[in-house]
Amino acid sequence: MGLKSFKRALWVYHLNTGSCNGCDIEILAALTPRYDLERFGIVLVGSPRHADVLLVTGPVTNQMAPRLKRIYDQVPEPKMVLVIGNCGVEGLVFHESYNLSGPVDQIIPVDVYVPGCPTRPEAIIEGVLKAWLKLEKPVKEKVT
């Protein structure tokens, strides 16, 4: 499936749930002219109500768990959740912390994982494009 066959631009809402900001810096690097994530029509939006993809970085702290769930519920269907970095995937160095609710998939369902510490911009772009492909798959209608 070529890039020209996508039906729409992809709007992404980014949420940091307690990371060291290493992955956040790499997300910003993916938006710079060197990697230019926006050439695919992928833009960051300021509200989860306008987003197609929820991009989450960091392990989920106890304080952020209800906020993450609330933000996830605000993203309209169809939606994708993309977890960036090892902390969000498995907790990494924070996995036994007293203040940690766990990795992201223990709070909300996750569609695409992009491991790394920090994750490189190329991997972030590949993960976002995988989420895009999953969103663009035709839904099979049930015959009743």
Image (cartoon, grey):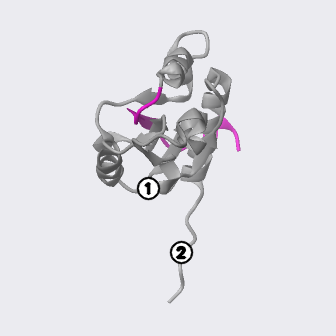
Q: Secondary structure at mark 2?
A: loop
In this view of the protein, can residue 128 be seen by the observer?
A: no
Q: Is residue 50 left or right of residue 20?
A: left
| Horizontal and vertical percent position of residue 87 | 55, 36
Position of the N terminus, as image quadrant, is top right
Point out the stretch of residues depicted in magenta. 1-19
> Disc 2 designates what residue?
141
| Horizontal and vertical percent position of residue 29 | 54, 15
Residue 2 located within the stretch drawn in magenta: yes
The quadrant where residue 40 appears? top right
Q: Secondary structure at mark 1?
A: loop
Please name the amino acid that badge 1 sits on: Pro
- Single out the residue that lies furthest toward the bottom: 144
Say which of marks 2 and 1 sits in front.
1
The quadrant where residue 83 appears? top right
Q: Is residue 40 left or right of residue 62?
A: right
| Residue 136 versus residue 32 in the image, above or below | below
